[in-house]
Image (spheres, rainbow, N blue to C red):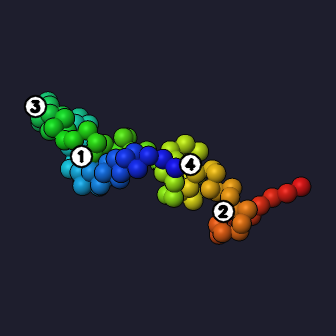
Amino acid sequence: MAKVSAVQRDLKRRRLVAKYASKREVLKAITQDKNASQEERFNATLQLAQLPKNSAKIRLRNRCALTGRPRGYHRKFKLSRNLVRELGSRGQLPGLTKSSW
């Protein structure tokens, strides 16, 4: 089980990313637009820098939905490898069959 503070920090970051996503997208489009004047692009860069660091999508970390474990994450199930194996063996994950040979 991951520390509660780490899970809460990640949830806070997810809220910030959602809040600033549209503003960040517009500013990034201006900075990458070659037709915009150099001054506009520079001002957009400054405004991007003023946004909270934790509002950047790159700062998100995939974590297990049940335990908060940050490593061994399966995107399809949003669970860690340990829980995928355990729940899959019990037959509690739809679309997952245990193989044996």
Of the two numbered discs 1 and 2 in the rendering, the one whose residue sits closer to the viewer: 2
* First reached walking from the N terminus: tag 1 or tag 4: 1
Secondary structure at numbered mark 3: helix
Indicate the quadrant containing the C terminus: top left, top right, bottom left or bottom right.
bottom right
Mark 2 residue crowding within 10 angstroms, few (<14) / some (14–19) / many (20+)? some
* First reached walking from the N terminus: tag 2 or tag 3: 3
User: Measured from the top left, where is residue 77 in percent x and y?
Assistant: 57, 59
Disc 2 to disc 4, C-alpha distance: 14 Å
User: Measured from the top left, where is residue 4 in percent x and y?
Assistant: 41, 50
The residue indicated by pointer 2 is 87
Secondary structure at numbered mark 2: helix
Q: Residue at x 50, y 44 (%)?
A: 70
Q: From what the image shows, is residue 85 above or below residue 30?
A: below
Q: Which of the pair 20/33 is nearer the observer?
A: 20
* First reached walking from the N terminus: tag 1 or tag 2: 1
What amino acid is labelled 3 in the image? Glu
The numbered mark at residue 39 is 3
How many numbered marks have been drawn onto this rendered protein structure?
Answer: 4
The numbered mark at residue 73 is 4
